[in-house]
Image (cartoon, rainbow, N blue to C red):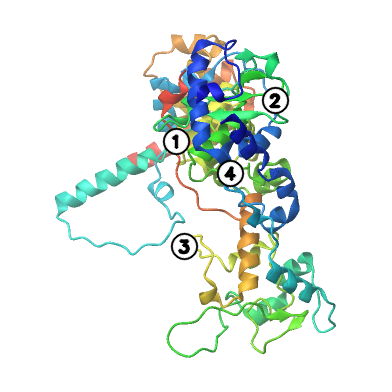
């Protein structure tokens, strides 16, 4: 059957030959699919990711999955059980009642806490993915075989979305790996994920985003971005970074605390060396250990900075105030405010201690 | 084989034209994953069209109100006096026999004016405009616990308004004016290492 298909395969790479035949077989089974793909491909455009800050040469992801970084991020996120387990809108069901002994109840509570801690998993922090422009095969003989491009998707059962091969035969006869947005749409067609829309929702457009930011709907926007986009999608990165900057400027860091996005916020700000306002917020809220962790995170992410150099001379079990002081002296841009906040925190602690003694 | 494949492709309805015609106007937001596009979708709903034409005729009895006015009305003192803190459908009672409410009527407005003496909670007040921007009104028809749209049997809305309501709520969720219940997405970090 494969021989009767009007494509010539001699020029293409051998592994593509194999997979391509597989695709062709699949295509016969899914008759409607190629027609669908034709139009989908027409609207594809690969935009270069816009990067406001120049830190793109380094890949943040290996740092992000580092166990020290993950520990710090989960520690500073906090665990306010009312916020994590608070009311979520979902389909209503009748409650179930059970009679439990004390031991069983303890076990249930432990299971619930375990389940809730998974809700704080931080979305991967990645660089935007790069378009793959090298053609797999160029067959000029196939030029103008049709008026639109054909998309071939591997729909073998059990393939993960990221490993799925999607290729495009263009009208001029070249065979390419499909652009990322086409691949995303094909994944959504053949392996739909709940919560993801086929077309990008309009709320991620600038004017709607602007309105939602002014309404301070940060967590909802970030949650929906997680559902809609892959973590290395340029749209995801643009949206989330926009929100992080808005949160930082408005000083609403506390809104994200005890959600999965606080770790990303802290990582983003520290990665781009803009964590001063976050540190100030922590000092103002009397979160000394969080402030210490944030400075530690800064030294891990920027091992070449002067802050890391001078902090290596300070002993590891020194107090939070000392660690923050080193940061203020070496890396801070908001020196006076941070110094004042640190002083105020110290004074408050001293007053507390004296009050306890009396 | 090849010939048959080609013929299948060529006889497909061009999706572009389909999108730009009646189909998008009906509901562009839920357009997804419809692989079996048949000619049936291109056929116009004769009934719906006849009704639209009916409603298009000008009537002096019913005022056409724009969305901005309606939004202002919902914030006004007059609205507060009329409805209090309850949703607009709260005090509406349907007149039916038996224990279970039947399906609501198809429409309250025919030929541009009220055709019934007991119109549904939205049709009875011409200043209530169901629109994606009018979130304060839309929220009254959404369950605060589950985030789902309430059934017309509960709210008493006529079928036509209920249909617009569903459409406008979807649109509002798409534009981010209303929040939508979202599933939790968990990541496997190993997928992203390469």
- SS for callout 3: loop
Q: Chain of mark 3?
A: B
**Labels 4 and 2 within one chain:** yes
Residue A77's disc is 1
- Residue A16's x, y, as percent? 52, 16
Determine whether label 3 and label 1 are within 8 Å by CB.
no
Residue ID at (66%, 32%): A41
Q: Is residue A97 left or right of residue A119?
A: left
Q: Is residue B194 left or right of residue B29?
A: left
Sooner in the amino-acid sequence: mark 4 or mark 2: 2
Task: Give the residue at mark 2.
Answer: A145
- SS for callout 2: loop
Q: Is residue A253 in view? A: no
Q: Chain of mark 2?
A: A
B96 lies above or below B158: below
Per the model, the C-alpha gap separating discs 3 and 1 is 27 Å
Q: Chain of mark 1?
A: A
Q: Nearer the viewer, mark 4 or mark 2?
A: 2
Per the model, the C-alpha gap separating discs 2 and 1 is 56 Å
Q: Is residue A282 left or right of residue A205?
A: left
Per the model, the C-alpha gap separating discs 4 and 2 is 44 Å
Q: Residues within 10 Å of mark 3 (few under 14, many from 20)?
A: few
Determine whether label 2 and label 3 are within 8 Å by CB.
no
Residue A221's disc is 4
Determine whether label 3 and label 4 are within 8 Å by CB.
no
């Amino acid at each position: 059957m494969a021989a009767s298909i009007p494509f010539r395969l001699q020029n293409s790479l051998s592994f593509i030959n194999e997979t391509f035949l597989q695709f062709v077989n699949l295509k016969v089974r899914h008759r409607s699919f190629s027609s669908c793909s034709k139009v989908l491909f027409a609207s594809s455009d690969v935009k270069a990711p816009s990067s406001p800050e120049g830190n793109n040469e380094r890949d943040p992801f290996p740092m992000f999955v580092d166990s020290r970084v993950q520990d710090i991020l989960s520690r500073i996120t906090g665990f306010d059980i009312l916020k994590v387990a608070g009311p979520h809108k979902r389909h209503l069901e009748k409650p179930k009642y059970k009679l439990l002994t004390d031991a069983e109840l303890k076990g249930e509570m432990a299971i619930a806490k375990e389940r809730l801690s998974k809700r704080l998993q931080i979305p991967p922090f990645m660089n935007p993915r790069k378009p793959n422009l090298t053609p797999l095969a160029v067959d000029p003989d196939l030029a103008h075989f049709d008026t639109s491009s054909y998309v071939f998707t591997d729909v073998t059962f059990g393939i993960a979305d990221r490993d799925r091969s999607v290729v495009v035969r263009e009208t001029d006869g070249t065979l390419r790996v499909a652009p990322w947005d086409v691949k995303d749409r094909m994944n959504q067609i053949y392996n739909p994920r709940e919560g993801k829309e086929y077309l990008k929702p309009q709320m991620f457009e600038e004017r709607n985003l602007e309105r939602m930011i002014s309404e301070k709907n940060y967590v909802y926007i970030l949650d929906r971005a997680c559902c809609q986009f892959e973590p290395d999608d340029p749209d995801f990165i643009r949206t989330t970074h926009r929100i992080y900057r808005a949160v930082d400027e408005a000083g609403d860091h506390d809104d994200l605390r005890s959600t999965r996005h606080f770790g990303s916020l802290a990582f983003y700000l520290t990665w781009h060396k803009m964590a001063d306002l976050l540190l100030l917020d922590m000092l103002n809220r009397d979160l000394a250990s969080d402030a210490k962790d944030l400075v530690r995170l800064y030294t891990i992410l920027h091992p070449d900075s002067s802050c890391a150099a001078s902090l290596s001379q300070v002993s590891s079990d020194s107090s939070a105030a000392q660690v923050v002081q080193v940061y203020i002296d070496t890396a801070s841009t908001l020196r006076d405010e941070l110094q004042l906040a640190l002083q105020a925190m110290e004074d408050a602690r001293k007053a507390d201690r004296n009050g306890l003694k009396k | 084989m090849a010939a048959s494949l080609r013929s299948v492709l060529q006889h497909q309805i061009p999706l572009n034209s389909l999108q730009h015609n009646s189909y998008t106007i009906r509901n562009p937001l839920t357009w997804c994953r419809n692989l079996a596009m048949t000619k049936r979708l291109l056929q116009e709903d004769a009934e719906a069209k006849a009704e639209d034409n009916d409603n298009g005729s000008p009537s002096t009895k019913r005022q056409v109100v724009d969305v901005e006015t309606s939004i202002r009305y919902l914030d006004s003192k007059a609205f507060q006096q009329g409805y209090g803190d309850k949703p607009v459908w709260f005090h509406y009672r349907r007149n039916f026999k038996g224990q279970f409410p039947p399906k609501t009527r198809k429409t309250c407005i025919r030929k541009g004016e009220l055709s019934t003496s007991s119109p549904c909670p939205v049709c009875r007040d011409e200043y209530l405009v169901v629109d994606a921007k009018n979130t304060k009104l839309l929220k009254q028809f959404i369950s605060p616990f589950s985030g789902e749209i309430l059934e017309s049997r509960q709210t008493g809305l006529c079928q036509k308004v209920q249909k617009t309501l569903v459409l406008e709520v979807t649109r509002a969720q798409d534009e981010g004016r209303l929040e939508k219940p979202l599933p939790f997405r968990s990541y496997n970090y190993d997928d992203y290492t390469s």
